[in-house]
Amino acid sequence: MSCSERRLNRLNALFGFDRNRTTLSREVVAGLTTFTTMSYIVVVNPAILSAAGIPEGPSFVATVLVAAFGCYFMAFYANRPFAIAPYMGENAFIAFTVCKVLGFRWQTALAAIFIAGVLFVVMTVLRLRQWIVDGVPTSLRYSFAVGIGLFLTFIGLNETGLVTLGVSGAPVQAGHLTSPPALVAMFGFVLIAVLVIRKVPGAILLGIVITAILAFAAHTAAAPQSIVSAPPSITPIVWQLDFRGAFTWRAFPVVLTIFIMAFVDTMGTLIGLSARAGFLDENGQLPQIERPMLVDAVTTCVAPALGTTTAGAYVESATGIEAGGRTGFTVLVTGTCFLLTLFFSPFVAAIPAQAFGPALIIVGLFMLAPITRIDFADYTESVPSFAVVVLMAFTFNIAIGICAGFVLYPICKIVAGKLNQLKPGLWVLTALSLLFFIFYPYS
């Protein structure tokens, strides 16, 4: 037996290629596919978090390291093809709601995330997480994705200058749509849309890179001094956790909201991906679900410790699953690809809003898809879902939308005489949401 055959047998024994009806080559292709569809986060996540005051260079490194850690942990511990990385949506909540609107320091926000992560770990070990999340109505899960999608879309429009602040009575207005930066941004949106329509691998990342190069050539953004270099130091943001500020009543709504958002995101993603991959049993349950749940819980603790926001399973993993990925080797490849991006930090840091803004708009489009699965004919389902979406978008606050849904849903069901449709876990979330509104720092 040759050395290559022995290595293949060891990998087969470790990841179970035969048992999962897959092959090494198929897993490699799946891992590369997953990476290309979610690699935009190495650009977009630091750009969003810069609004909170987190420096982009170190933030880029933290994003990459957290993604690699989460993917490797998922590969070797849970052996599932679910890629882990810092979440879109949660990062916007931290940057724009917690830090810019509420005025918290980013160090306090990261400490709040760490606290939520520790709670996740404890609840996962005690098997309480699934019980609570089982109580979240399906329609609300879909509405969370839709609301966050509109939220990200508005950020993208505003960052690119296509939409700007207006005046009293007309809060927003069109930007200078014929200015060079706006034209570059519009080109970026059309380009990414075309690439997505043509199903080009890595469409979003490719669109960002091409648009950035156009911006540099058109002098609407400063070009980087170099393309490749050693990674910037992560020291300025490692373990910068303000626990004193996080353990206050004023910060309680922040911790609560981070807790709820990550709770719902991860469970919905895991179940959805598992259904597509054929992992669910005859009862619709994912065997050993506590393993991938523990992976995201531990990674959510590691993320703020390194200097970035909540991490969890990525829905883009579906592309790798579609390509045949069925084991942890898929995300082992994905994590390795993330590590290789560390050496392109000068270019990543120079990418302007007119290049990454269109990507946010497109990601927002993707997140609108679940709206078709909300039953608008049943007002006990559509009223809470509608409140979630519009309050997220029009209050510029993801937390308010989520908590409003948890409060309105049981009210609507009680009024309609459908109390039997409410699960015990939902009452826990409703109580937490009421506390959120009571203690929310409205000033």
Image (tube, grey):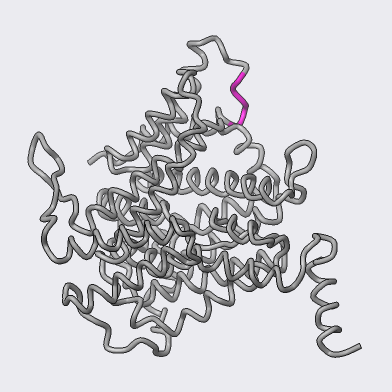
**Magenta span main SS:** helix
Question: At which x and y percent is residue 198?
Answer: 45, 59
In screen coordinates, is 46 left or right of 323? left
Q: Residue at x 22, y 59 (%)?
A: 160
Nearest the viewer among 76 and 334 is: 334
Task: Give the quadrant of residue 329.
Answer: bottom right
In screen coordinates, is 244 left or right of 281? left
Question: At which x and y percent is residue 20?
Answer: 80, 60
Placement of 289 over or under 73, stated as above or below: above
Nearest the viewer among 410 and 35 is: 35
Placement of 262 over or under 195, stated as above or below: above
The range drawn in magenta is: 421-425
Task: Give the quadrant of residue 291.
Answer: bottom right
Task: Give the quadrant of residue 42.
Answer: bottom left
- Tell me, yes or no, if residue 78 can be seen here: no
In screen coordinates, is 202 left or right of 52? right
Determine the residue located farthest toward the left in the rendered image: 167
Question: At which x and y percent is residue 375?
Answer: 50, 25
